[in-house]
């Protein structure tokens, strides 16, 4: 069921926006938001009500992850480095939504610079799970997932480099999708790893995800990796699809309740007339190692720009330029940011480049070949999103490798640039949500969403 | 097993323009060692003759005309983001 459609033209935009802001404030204890863009939002709502702004999303409130440059509040990336950064421009994705009348009411918490899988790594405090406040929201787009799950807004934007939309969507029981690499312009979004960074969204139905992605999709001169818009609106689900259940995602390493919910979802797919068969991707066992070489390498390069000079945090009491760089970066970044930057510097340094970085990019080719081979036979692949439901706050923070292992089922689609979504597939006995992941071939995004919509479980 | 010395961590910090405290250096030494030992499993993979993938959607060089495009952001706005500046430039401490 579309939630967005309840907002378009149903009542005054001011009433919708005021209600969303009130709900955001009432749910302050989840710490899902870092700021509200209240003044600007109300101003735009009045413009919609006066008919000065029209469009497919006229008067629909939304929230963006705080690594999207947007007017009305600082863009912090949940870091001390950008604590006071007032964006001089807006992200293309935000501009496109605003052009259709949508109204950004606030900015959601994340792991600083989107480095993390729990939103515990924010410089401004931990976001709590929408269903159980003792558990993590997931991450890095944890705040966006929680505001969608609490129904503060009908949709929220996130970024997904290795699972940062899909995993929190799974943990909070909402839909979350990363589209094909290059679907949505990343211009005006704080860069993490340029070869896998994607922009996507959270909503309470596959239909709403499709509506929002369809509006954001398309080429942009300011992001040369964008693809021409291939997003077909109102796509009907292709009947009788062949779907592969990924065997490597259904081993004993995955919680039994997660496997059970996945099996139930597979039964739904079968009941809907699709054929599901077990498939294998042997390269999956290497994907985390590849990911934690390639992504830190790109992070070390992308985060070189934060030097305390032109914008962002600047350390006090330094006497030389080198000290200014070193101290501003030490004080402005979180430990996880530094860890990734230094791993990146290591794998890119001379003597190690071939052994690590090149080897990982070659392994990536082998992974992509295995995906391509499966997509000759199968329309989509299915499996869990995360090996467990939301884990406890503080449970994984002491061991970075353990935290990284939680990404094992989301990074493969990222490394291959494939569209992948998390759809709600029920809960465990304690009521914690469990998501199931659908992965499609490149540019099959709309078809993948149509498939998810046709077997909506909740 | 890769072992990373304290000197190597400090060298990496220097390459990364990070002025780490002693405590942080100690903690990161252990973390980096663990991460490197994890990612080393790629060594066992035979990639002879495999081309690396840097771009996943098959795009290659995209050309545009070499013309000046006016930015929507003014020089004043950009300068206002810097902590230390003069009328028309950003200021930094001495280089050496």
Image (cartoon, rainbow, N blue to C red):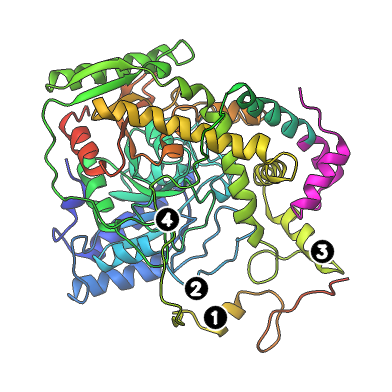
Q: Answer yes or no: do the residues labelled 1 and 2 have beta carbons within 8 Å? A: yes
**For mark 1, what is the residue?**
B77
**Is label 1 or label 3 in front?**
3
Left or right of residue A96: residue A164: right
Question: In the image as oriented, which residue stretches furthest toward the front?
Answer: B49
| Helix, strand or loop status at disc 4 | loop
**For mark 2, what is the residue?**
A88
Please tell me which residue is depicted at 44% across the width and 62% down the height of the picture. Answer: A187
Left or right of residue A350: residue A292: left
**Is label 2 or label 3 in front?**
3
Provide residue A166's location: percent of width, then percent of height: 39, 36
Density class for disc 3 (Cα within 10 Å; few <14, some 14-19, many ≥20) is: some
Provide residue A145's location: percent of width, then percent of height: 39, 42
**For mark 3, what is the residue?**
A322
| Helix, strand or loop status at disc 3 | helix
- A18 or A445, which lies in front? A445
Chain containing mark 3: A
**For mark 4, what is the residue?**
B60
Q: Are marks 2 and 4 on the same chain?
A: no
Density class for disc 2 (Cα within 10 Å; few <14, some 14-19, many ≥20) is: some
Q: Answer yes or no: do the residues labelled 4 and 3 have beta carbons within 8 Å? A: no
- B28 or A79, which lies in front? B28
Chain containing mark 2: A
| Helix, strand or loop status at disc 2 | loop
């Amino acid at each position: 069921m579309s939630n967005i459609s309840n907002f378009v033209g149903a009542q005054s935009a001011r009433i919708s926006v005021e209600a969303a802001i009130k709900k955001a404030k009432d749910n302050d204890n989840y710490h899902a938001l870092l700021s509200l863009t209240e003044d600007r939002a109300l101003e735009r709502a009045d413009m919609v009500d006066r008919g000065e702004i029209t469009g497919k999303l006229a008067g629909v409130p939304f929230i963006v992850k705080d690594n999207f440059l947007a007017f009305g509040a600082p863009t912090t990336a949940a870091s001390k480095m950008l604590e006071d950064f007032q964006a001089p421009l807006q992200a293309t994705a935000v501009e496109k939504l605003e052009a259709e009348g949508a109204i950004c009411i606030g900015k959601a918490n994340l792991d600083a610079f989107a480095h993390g899988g729990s939103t515990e790594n924010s410089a401004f405090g931990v976001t709590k799970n929408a269903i159980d406040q003792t558990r993590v929201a997931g991450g890095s787009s944890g705040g966006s997932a929680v505001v969608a799950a609490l129904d503060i807004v009908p949709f929220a934007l996130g970024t997904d480099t290795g699972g940062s939309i899909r995993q929190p969507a799974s943990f909070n029981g909402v839909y979350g999708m990363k589209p094909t690499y290059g679907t949505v312009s990343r211009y005006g979004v704080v860069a993490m790893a340029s070869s896998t960074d994607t922009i996507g969204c959270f909503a309470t139905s596959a239909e709403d995800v499709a509506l929002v992605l369809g509006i954001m999709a398309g080429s942009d001169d300011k992001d040369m990796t964008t693809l021409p818009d291939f997003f077909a609106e109102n796509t009907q689900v292709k009947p009788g699809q062949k779907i592969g259940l990924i065997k490597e995602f259904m081993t004993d390493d995955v919680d039994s309740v997660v496997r059970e919910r996945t099996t139930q979802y597979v039964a739904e797919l079968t009941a809907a007339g699709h054929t599901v068969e077990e498939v294998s991707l042997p390269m999956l066992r290497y994907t985390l190692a590849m990911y934690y070489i390639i992504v830190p390498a790109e992070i070390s390069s992308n985060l070189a720009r934060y030097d305390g000079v032109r914008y962002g945090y600047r350390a006090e009491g330094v006497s030389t330029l080198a000290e200014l760089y070193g101290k501003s970066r030490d004080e402005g970044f979180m430990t996880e940011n530094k860890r990734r930057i230094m791993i990146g510097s290591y794998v890119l340094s001379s003597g190690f480049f071939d052994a690590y970085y090149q080897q990982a990019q070659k392994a990536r080719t082998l992974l992509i070949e295995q995906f391509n081979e499966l997509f000759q036979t199968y329309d989509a692949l299915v499996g869990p999103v995360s090996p467990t439901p939301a884990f406890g706050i503080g449970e994984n923070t002491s061991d970075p490798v353990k935290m990284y292992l939680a990404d094992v089922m989301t990074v493969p689609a990222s490394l291959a640039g494939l569209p992948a979504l998390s759809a709600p597939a029920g809960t465990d006995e304690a009521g914690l949500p469990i998501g199931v992941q659908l992965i499609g071939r490149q540019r099959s995004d709309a078809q993948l969403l149509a498939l998810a919509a046709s077997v909506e479980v909740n | 097993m890769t072992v990373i010395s304290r000197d190597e961590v400090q060298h990496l910090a220097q390459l990364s323009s990070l002025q780490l405290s002693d405590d942080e250096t100690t903690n990161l030494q252990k973390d980096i060692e663990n991460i490197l030992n994890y990612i080393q499993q790629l060594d066992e993979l035979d990639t002879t003759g495999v081309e690396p993938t840097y771009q996943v959607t098959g795009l290659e060089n995209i050309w545009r005309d070499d013309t000046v495009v006016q930015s929507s952001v003014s020089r004043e706005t950009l300068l206002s983001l810097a902590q230390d500046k003069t009328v028309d430039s950003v200021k930094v401490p001495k280089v050496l």
